[in-house]
Image (tube, rainbow, N blue to C red):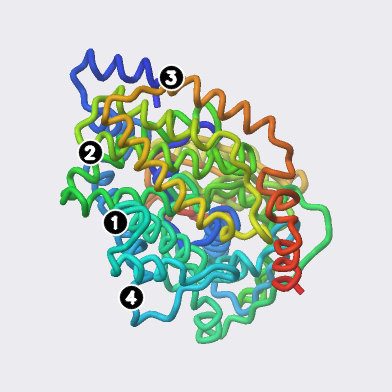
């Protein structure tokens, strides 16, 4: 990553001790709950590689859970993540895995919602507090959270993307990056749309009402 | 950052009658899409977090700040400072205490500014706050120092690396030291050439420094190396402000730092498979921590 800005060079402002093992982990947890949106009753964090080996020394567990509770990387309440989880009745577990992972700092978050859905989100911490979400529910995706990101679940029909991009352009929202993934032809597709502009509630409502749209989630740009 | 060398950058600033801080600010407005006000507020918060970090170890109402390995060393220097009998004099001793304080806070999951990284987060606050107190600098001056330091850090990140895993400690504490020294020279009225001379000298003094953290944690030897990086920053600022130039120019020094970093074996680049991490005591600490 050669495109650093002020917020990388003199920042991030963060809870220590490690930008990759603490701040990046927090950001993965935060982004995961932002994707799921629903209240979660139980969550498992499966740790791989360096995360599995050194998570206790770096507070990776505290950071992942704190992020998952909606705390940002510079929130001093992070250290109380275990207590906050207990107070909210969120059950949590950390599992170390010896399995191969895409990156030394990888975590799989398995979350069980109050509607009995199970979500599986894989994130990697790539250094300097930055992260990438690698997979959502078994579908490979790749996004950094550096942009306002729309995650759409929609029917794999022709014209869906055109409808989405028309809606965005009508609201003068510029698409920075757009990716499309699907499990199987004709079933459900996931769109990852990263935009320069903020996305207002009205736009989200319009997108949700599109024919063939199942679910739209906005993951707001968290930090610079 | 539109320039790749400090030479181009200095020339551009001179031709356009821009200070380093004004150029840095205008670059970041373009770079990040954020407003002037947003960036200033961000830097004000950075100063607040740094100020709190350097003083945190003196707050006796707080429980002692301990990491898994280090803790409470900052207070020891503060106690000695009170005796007015320091070896280094007040400025260096205070800078060391401030750097240790910030690293102890970081190790105990407190709030810090990774500048440029968490492993080197003690250097900038130590140097900035020591200089601020010594010369009664105001917030405006500190902001201009941070903006000048940002130019140094950006050039290093662009042309070399600021990651210990890639370039060893010289890339982390070395960059922090160069940034801090640049800030001091800029804040005290040095020319842009002096700013980059100070940064170049900082790197030269730390060239080859390996990254060998005990048990893989950002604690030992990191904390004391931050104290050293702070002292080095002040020393090089002193030399530069006196008119001493770096024999090798900044851009070439950064290139050399990168080459040296790549030449370091992986065992000395943050893997904890060499250096102090694999000494008898280092291994024992790791075994005790993760048993």
* Letter of the chain that mark 3 sits on in the rendering: B
Q: Residue at x 73, y 37 (%)?
A: B265
Q: Earlier in the sequence, mark 3 or mark 1?
A: 1
* Letter of the chain that mark 4 sits on in the rendering: B
Element class at badge 3: loop
* Letter of the chain that mark 1 sits on in the rendering: B
Q: Within 10 Å of the Cα at label 2, are there few (<14), some (14-19), or many (20+) other Cα atoms?
A: many
Q: Position of residue B252 (x, y in %)?
A: 50, 20
Do discs 2 and 3 share a chain? yes
Which of the two residues, A184 or A90, is positioned nearer the viewer here? A90
Camera-nearest label, 3 or 4: 3
Q: Residue at x 30, y 42 (%)?
A: B146
Q: Can you name the residue that lies furthest to the right here? A: A99
Task: Provide the residue designation for mark 3.
Answer: B247
Q: CA distance from mark 1 to mark 4?
A: 20 Å
**Badges 2 and 3: C-beta atoms under 8 Å apart?**
no
Q: Kindly indicate the quadrant of the structure image that contains residue A57.
A: bottom right
Task: Provide the residue designation for mark 1.
Answer: B90
Task: Provide the residue designation for mark 4.
Answer: B59
Q: Earlier in the sequence, mark 4 or mark 2?
A: 4
Task: Provide the residue designation for mark 2.
Answer: B187
Q: Earlier in the sequence, mark 1 or mark 4?
A: 4
């Amino acid at each position: 990553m050669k495109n650093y800005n002020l917020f990388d060079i003199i920042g991030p402002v963060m809870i220590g001790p490690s930008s990759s093992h603490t701040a990046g982990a927090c950001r993965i947890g935060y982004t995961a709950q932002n994707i799921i949106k629903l209240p979660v009753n139980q969550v498992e964090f499966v740790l791989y590689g360096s995360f599995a080996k050194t998570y206790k020394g770096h507070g990776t567990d505290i950071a992942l859970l704190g992020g998952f509770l909606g705390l940002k990387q510079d929130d001093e309440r992070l250290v109380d993540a275990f207590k906050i989880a207990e107070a909210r009745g969120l059950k949590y577990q950390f599992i170390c895995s010896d399995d191969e992972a895409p990156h030394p700092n990888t975590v799989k978050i398995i979350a069980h919602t109050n509607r009995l859905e199970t979500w599986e989100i894989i994130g990697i911490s790539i250094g300097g507090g930055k992260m990438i979400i690698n997979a959502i529910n078994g579908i490979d995706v790749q996004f950094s959270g550096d942009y306002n990101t729309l995650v759409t679940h929609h029917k794999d029909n022709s014209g869906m993307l055109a409808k989405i991009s028309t809606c965005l352009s009508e609201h003068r929202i510029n698409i920075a990056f757009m990716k499309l993934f699907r499990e199987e032809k004709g079933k459900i597709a996931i769109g990852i749309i990263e935009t320069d502009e903020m996305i207002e509630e009205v736009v989200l409502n319009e997108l949700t009402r599109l024919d063939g749209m199942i679910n739209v989630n906005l993951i707001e740009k968290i930090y610079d | 950052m539109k320039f790749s060398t400090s030479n181009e950058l200095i020339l551009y600033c001179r031709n356009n009658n821009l200070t380093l801080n004004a150029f840095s600010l205008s670059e970041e407005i373009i770079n990040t899409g954020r407003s002037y006000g947003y960036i200033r507020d961000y830097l004000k918060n950075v100063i607040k977090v740094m100020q709190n970090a350097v003083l945190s170890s003196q707050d006796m109402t707080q429980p002692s700040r301990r990491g898994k390995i280090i803790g409470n060393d900052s207070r020891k220097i503060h106690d000695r400072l009170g005796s007015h009998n320091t070896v280094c004099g007040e400025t260096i001793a205070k800078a060391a205490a401030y750097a240790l304080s910030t690293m102890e806070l970081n190790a105990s999951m407190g709030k810090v500014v990774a500048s440029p990284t968490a492993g080197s987060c003690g250097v900038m606050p130590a140097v900035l706050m020591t200089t601020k107190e010594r010369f009664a600098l105001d917030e405006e001056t500190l902001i201009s120092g941070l903006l000048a330091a940002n130019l140094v850090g950006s050039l290093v990140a662009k042309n070399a690396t600021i990651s210990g895993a890639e370039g060893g400690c010289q890339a982390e504490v070395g960059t922090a030291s160069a940034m801090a020294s640049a800030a001091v020279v800029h804040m005290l009225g040095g020319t842009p050439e002096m700013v980059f001379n100070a940064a170049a000298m900082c790197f030269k003094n730390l060239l080859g420094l390996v990254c060998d953290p005990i048990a893989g944690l950002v604690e030992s030897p990191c904390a004391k190396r931050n104290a050293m990086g702070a002292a080095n920053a002040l020393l090089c600022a002193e030399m530069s402000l006196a008119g001493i130039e770096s024999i090798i120019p900044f851009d070439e020094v950064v290139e050399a730092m990168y080459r040296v970093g790549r030449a370091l074996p992986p065992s000395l680049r943050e893997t904890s498979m060499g250096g102090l991490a694999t000494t008898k005591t280092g291994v024992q600490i790791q075994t005790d921590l993760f048993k």
